Image (tube, rainbow, N blue to C red):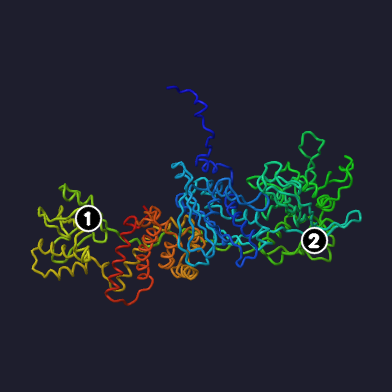
Amino acid sequence: MTTGSPTRAHRPAAINVQPHPRLLSVLGDIEFAPWQCIAELVDNAFDEFLRHDGHEETPTVVVSLPGRNSTPRDGEVWVKDNGPGMTLETLNNALRAGWTSNDRYGRLGLFGVGFNIATARLGHVAVVRTARVGDPDWTVVTVDLRAMVAGGHFDLPVTTEAKTSPEEHGTQIVIRQLKPEHHDTLSRQQPKIKQALGDVYSYLLADRGFRLIVDREAVKPRRACVWSPERSVTRNGQKIPAVIHVDHTLSPRHACLDCGLWQDVDDHVCEDCGSGRLEIRERRIWGWVGIQRYLSTSDYGIDFLRNGRKILVRDDSLFRWDDPNEPSGRGEPEYPMEVPAGAGRIVGEIHIDHVRVNYQKNAFEYETPDWKRVVRALRGEGPLLPKRARALGYPENASPLALLVAGYRRNVPGLNYLIPGDGKVALHQRAREWAELFRKGDPEYQSDEQWYLAAQQHDNPTPVPSVPAPAAGDILAAKGLLDPGPNAEQLPMDAPTIARESEDDRRQRWRSRGHRLPDLEGRYGLPGHGAAMQVTAWLVHGEPVTRGDDTERVPVYVAAGKGSSVEVFIDGDHPVFTDFAVDTRDLVVLELAEYLRVRDRSDRALSAVFYDLKNKCLPDHKIAGPFLKEAAERILTHIREALQPVIAGNSSGYWSLVPAEDQAAAEQTFALEGGYANWEDMLAGGEWIDFVPALALVRLVTARPEAFLDGRIFRSAYNSLSDLVARKVSMERLVDLLGDVAILADRPARRGPEELQRGRLSCFLLEQELADPEGKPA
C-alpha cells in the first residue's frame, strides 16, 4: 500500500471549499462600533420602508438596549419594525453570510453581510421573528454561533409562534449572550447611541417621516442650524445666498446589480463580472451647501448621504485642494483660514445614491470616477481661493463651495459676513448657545432672527437694544440621586437545621429520590403538648415509602430524628394521591397530629389536634380571602425578585410588552408607595417590575417564554422541546398557574370553597415551578 499522490483515475474532479461555521464568529471581529451594529439592523428595516411606499402605518423601528443593571448574560438588544415581514425563503436568504437581495446602489444595507457582522459583533445568539399580514404564525429562527461551530454545520432550527392577530406583521431581532466588551457601552451609553442614530438618519426621520424609537424615546433628527436661504452677502457685485441648492442630473447608465460597475446603456452583459443583472439607473447629485449660524472647530463640514443615510458626517475633505501635479498628495487646506483658528461654518447635505460605499458605511470609494465627479460638482476643478487659482492658471471658480468661501470665509461680526456681535466683538459663544436652544426645539430660536438681530446690532449698536441671554432651562430639576435602598420587608425563612444523623439506607434512598417541600417545614407545636417538632418534609418519587420494616406501602411516613426533629417522607406516587387526589398537606398534618398524640399520650380527638396544628402552625394554608391573597403576594414577590435581573437585560424592551393601562397603574403604585427614587431610573434598571399589576407578569411570560422558562426562572421546559405543540402546552400550563395566582393577588373577591381550593393548589404548584425555593433563577 502506498501513501503517495493519488493516481489520475482517483483524483477528484472538484473540491468543496464551503467555509466552516467558525467564519460567522470571525465576522464579529470586524471593527464596528456598537451604534454601527444597531444601525446595520435599522438599515434593513428602513430598506423595506423605502422599497414599499404608501404605508398605512408610520414606518417605525423600535430599539431596546440592555438596562444599566443588566449583565452580559442577561442583557439583550431588541430591534423590531412594522415592515411587511418576510417569507421563510426570504428569511433563509437574508441570513446567509454574503448574500443580499439588495443591489449595489438601490438600498441602504446588505442584509446577509450586515446582519451577520452586527449580531456576531454584539453577542453569541440572535433570534429572528418575522411574519406578514395573513400569516397564521410568526416564523422564528435562532442563530447560535457557538452551537453552529460545535456542530460544524450551517443548519438553523426553524420554529413558529402563534400570532395574537392575523394582521400582525414585521420583523424582530433579539441578540442575546452579549459580549462583555460591548455590553458596557450598550447598557451605559444610550444617550450617545441615540445621538449618533439621530445624526446618521436625520434626513429619513425629518424629511421622510420615518420613526426611530430607542428605549421608549423617539430619536430626534439632528437638524442643520443654518441661515435662511433668503439671507445673503454681496461680493464684487454678485449676490451670494447663505444656502446654495445643488442639483446635477447625470446621464443614466447601466448598473451591474452584482458587482456595481457602471457601464454604457448599450451593454447587456457586465463587462467586469459577466452578470446579466444590469439595470438602467438615474444618477443625481443633489442637496445643498450653506452657512451655519455659529462657528465651531469640529461641528462643520458636509454630510454625504446614500439612500437617506449619512455615510460621511461633517466631512471637511473638500475644503482641501489636491493639486494633481503635487506628487506628495498631502493636499493644501483652503478653509477655514481665519481667526479663531480652525473654526468653520460651511455645512451641507449632499445625496449621492449612485456612489459606492465601503462595507462599514463610513466612507465612499474615493478612487471611482463617480466620487471624483461629485468633488468637481461641489468645488470645481481648481482651488477655491481666487488668488491661488490664478497663480496656478485655473479659470475663475464658480462652484458652490467657491462662492461660499468667497462670501463667508472671514469671521468679522456684522451683516457683511452674517456674524452676530455686540458692537465691539463677535458673539461666537453666544451664537453656539443659541444653537443648542435651536436643537432643543425652543420656538424662539428656530428661525435665524436672533442671530440676524445680533449681527445687525453690531453694525448699529445705538438704536438696537442688546439681546438678553436666554433664561436657563430647568436643568436643576431633582434627579433622585439618593439611593432609596431596599425597603421591601424580608419575610423570614426560618430554614430549619436538618439533623444529618446517621440514617439507614432506606431513608437515604428516599432523600436521594425526593425534593424538599419548604411550605410544610418549620416548627409544629401546641400548648400542653410538650416540645415543638422541627419538621423537614420530603416528596419522594420512584421509591415506595413503607413504615419501619413493614412491606406495606404508606402515603406518609413520619420518622423521629434527634431531639425534637422529625422527618416526613411523602410517597408522591401513592394511589391515594394519584387516584383520589387527596391533598398532600392535609394528610401530612394529619400524620403529624397522630405523631403528637402518641408521643404525648394525649387522649384528645385526632381531628381536634389536626385543626389546632393547621390553625396555629400553617396560617398560610388558610384559603379564606385575606390569607390566600397574602400567600399569592408572597409567591409573586419571589417571582418579581427573580425576574428583575432578566428584565434589566432589556428593561425598555420588556416594558414595551406591558399594556398601557398596566404601565399607568405601575407608575401610580410607585407614587402611592412614596417612591423616593426617580421613576425614569426604575424604568432604566428594570425595578418597575415591582410595581406592575400581577397580571402583567402573565403577559410578559406569555410574550417571551424562552426568556423565563428552562430553569431561568421557572422549571418548565421550552427551548429544549423540539415539538411546537409541546412548547405551547408547557408554556400554557405555567401561564395558567401564574394567572390564577395573579388574580388572587390583584382581584381579591368572595369565592366558593372549590375556587379557593383551586387557588391554593395553584399557589402550591406555581411555587414548585420556581427554579429554586427562593424564586431566584438557577
Image spot of residue 138 (x, y percent):
49, 60
Instruction: Label 2: state its secondary structure.
Output: loop
Mark 1: few/some/many CA within 10 Å (<14, 14-19, 20+): many
Judging depth in this view, the residue of 360 and 678 nearest the camera is 360
Residue 495 percent location from the top left of the image = 26, 56
Q: Amino acid at mark 1?
A: Val
Left or right: where does residue 97 sit relative to residue 224? left
Which of the two marks, 1 or 2, is nearer to us in this view? 1
Task: Tell me which numbered mark, 1 or 2, is placed earlier along the sequence.
Answer: 2
233 over 149 or under it: above or below? below
Can you name the residue that lies furthest to the front here? 9
Residue 560, placed above or below residue 754: above
350 left or right of 670?
Answer: right
Residue 255 coordinates in the image, percent (x, y): 71, 49
List x then y, in percent, for residue 406.
85, 51
The reply, left or right, for residue 235 in relation to residue 80 is right
Q: Nearer the viewer, residue 464 or 333?
A: 333
Cα separation between marks 1 and 2: 83 Å
The answer to whether 236 is drawn above or below residue 207 in the figure is above
Residue named by callout 1: 540
Q: Which residue is mark 2?
A: 229
Identity of the residue drawn at 36% across and 57% down:
714
Quarter of the rendering containing residue 544: bottom left
